[in-house]
Image (cartoon, grey):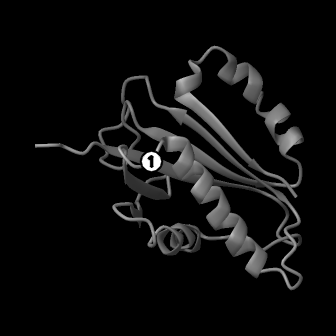
């Protein structure tokens, strides 16, 4: 019998824009974008979770999807949604999907916390991907990690 392995990815939203530039999303709105957008993908489930940092839980079959593929799909889903919110369908900001696989011990016993082997993903909306990445020292923070434990997806304006 072939047992399918399920991957787990948790998304957080980092809205690094002014509210005048683009409408912010509350937790429910942010989650609904991915719940709706992932419905067409077989065996992928998506839900809003109750966690102070993480907003969305995505469960996916690792036989069908690599984690970076799910990240790319999520980036495109958010881009498509944001384009519909602009009158000219022209996106005016950058979207980053910054992901890392948890390798450290669990701090919280909450079932909605990130567990070892799972992917924590910051979904970032910003005016400048380069400026944002420099500010959080992405290259420095990720340089010591194995490449298979991180990924970055950039959707630039």
In this view, the residue farthest toward the left is: 1
In this rendering, the count of numbered labels is 1
- Can you say whether 41 is above or below 73 in the image? below
Give whichever of 1, 135 is nearer the camera: 1
In which quadrant of the rendered image does the N terminus lie? top left
Left or right of 7, for residue 141:
right
Count neighbours of disc 1 (C-alpha within 10 A) and say few if under 14, some if 14 to 19, many if 20 or more: few
Asked whether the viewer can see residue 53, the reply is: no
SS class of the residue under badge 1?
Answer: loop
In which quadrant of the rendered image does the C terminus lie? bottom right
In this view, the residue farthest toward the front is: 1
The image shows residue 83 at horizontal and vertical percentages of 77, 75
Left or right of 149, for residue 13:
right
Left or right of 153, for residue 103:
left
Question: Which residue shows up at 49% across the image and 52% down it?
Answer: 52
Give whichever of 143, 141 is nearer the camera: 143
- Can you say whether 32 is above or below 74 in the image? below
Question: Which residue shows up at 50% across the image and 58% down it?
Answer: 55
In this view, the residue farthest toward the bottom is: 87
Question: Which residue shows up at 84% across the image and 53% down it?
Answer: 156
The image shows residue 38 at horizontal and vertical percentages of 48, 67
Q: Mark 1 points at which residue?
A: 65
Q: Quadrant of residue 45?
A: bottom left
- Can you say whether 57 is above or below 121 in the image? below
Asked whether the viewer can see residue 133, the reply is: yes
The image shows residue 87 at horizontal and vertical percentages of 86, 85
């Amino acid at each position: 019998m072939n047992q399918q392995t399920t991957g787990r990815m948790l998304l957080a939203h980092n809205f690094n824009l002014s509210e005048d530039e683009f409408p912010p999303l509350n937790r429910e709105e942010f989650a609904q974008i991915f719940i709706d957008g992932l419905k067409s993908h077989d065996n992928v489930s998506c839900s809003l979770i109750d966690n102070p940092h993480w907003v969305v839980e995505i469960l996916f079959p690792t036989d069908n999807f690599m984690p970076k593929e799910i990240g790319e799909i999520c980036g495109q889903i958010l881009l498509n949604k944001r384009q519909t919110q602009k009158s000219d369908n022209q996106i005016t900001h950058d979207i980053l999907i910054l992901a890392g696989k948890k390798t450290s011990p669990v701090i919280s016993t909450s079932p909605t916390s990130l567990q070892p082997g799972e992917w924590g993903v910051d979904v970032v909306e910003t005016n400048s991907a380069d400026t944002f990445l420099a500010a959080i020292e992405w290259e420095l923070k990720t340089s010591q990690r194995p490449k298979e434990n991180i990924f970055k997806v950039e959707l630039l304006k």
